Image (cartoon, rainbow, N blue to C red):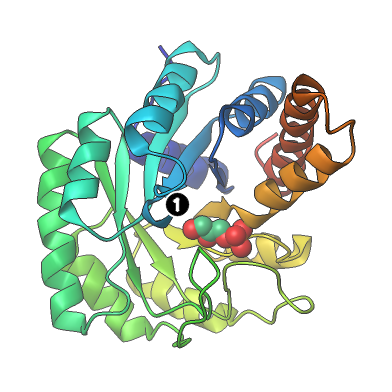
Amino acid sequence: MALTNLRELLAQAERHKRAVGAFNVSSIEMICGVVRAAEALRTPVILQIAESRLATTPLPMLGRAMYEAAERAQVPIALHLDHGSSMACIRQALELGFTSVMFDGSALRMEDNIARTLEAAGLARSFGAAIEGEIGSLGRTENGETAFARYTCPEDAVRFARETGVDALAVAIGNAHGVYAGTPAFHFEVLDAIRTQCDTPLVLHGGTGSSAENFRRCIESGVRKINIATAIFMASAQAARSVNQDDWFAMSRAITDAVTEVAKEHIRLFGIA
Ligand code: 13P
């Protein structure tokens, strides 16, 4: 049984000064591609899906497939709900066996973010699962909508981590979901300021296109989970276009192969392999 709690993977990543790859999936091909990459590199990974994607990929269906994949895998795999916003969805993920959930209260006032994160944390803990929170605001949401970017204030992050007791803390340091226009300039001083006062493992969202050097610096400054979604989705779409489109099974194989390569490439960059 390879299904694993996020806390364990983060602690392992901390010991080895590396980050765990958290890959967003929305099909069986993507699940298989990520697991195959993890097994090939003998590396733990996180399989995750964002609440906003559930309209096209129902959680009870894909969640069960993710669970089965994790159970059968030859490496430890955590199952994570990304950007959870409703308690109903968070509960559903936990009931399906997800080993961690994110409550994204980054658009809320600090007090409300703390209160709702605590509520989600209580729910997660009652299932023995871990919780990720977010403080600060990324420039783009995970489904491509533009949002107001607000870098994380280190003092707020430290207070948030202390009062909520989250297992993982997502921060905004110039990162955004989707495709960057060039290599993004990250504010590492924010990570360093948080790190000196708090040892909660940090999470980098918006991993796609961030650059190897940015990953290295983030990991050096305490980032222990890095999210990759767009690279998985873009590689899948490209792979589907690259083969005979009258042959679904060729497309399916091409998607799995492409996702395997994307996941491997990132796992190597995150220093685990
Ligand atoms: P990207 O889509 O930029 O890889 O971001 C993924 C992410 O942070 C999911 O929460």
Q: Is residue 200 visible?
A: yes
Residue ID at (55%, 54%): 226
Rendering coords of residue 224 (x, y %): 50, 52
Mark count: 1
Q: Is residue 157 above or below residue 86?
A: below
Give me the residue at 16% from left, 53% from top. 87
Viewer-proximal residue, 2 or 83? 83
Residue 210 occupies quadrant: bottom right
Q: Position of residue 21 (x, y in %)?
A: 58, 44
**Callout 1: 10 Å neighbours few (<14), some, many (20+)?**
some
Left or right, residue 180 beside residue 172 = right
Q: Quadrant of ligand 1?
A: bottom right
Task: Identify which residue, 221 or 231, lies in the foreground.
Answer: 231
Q: Residue at x 18, y 63 (%)?
A: 117
At which x and y percent is residue 105? 27, 70
Residue 128 percent location from the top left of the image:
18, 33
Q: Quadrant of residue 176?
A: bottom right
Identify the residue under disc 1. Answer: 53
Horizontally, is 122 left or right of 196 in the view? left
Q: Quadrant of the N terminus?
A: top left
Image quarter of the C terminus: top right
Q: Is residue 152 above or below residue 34?
A: below
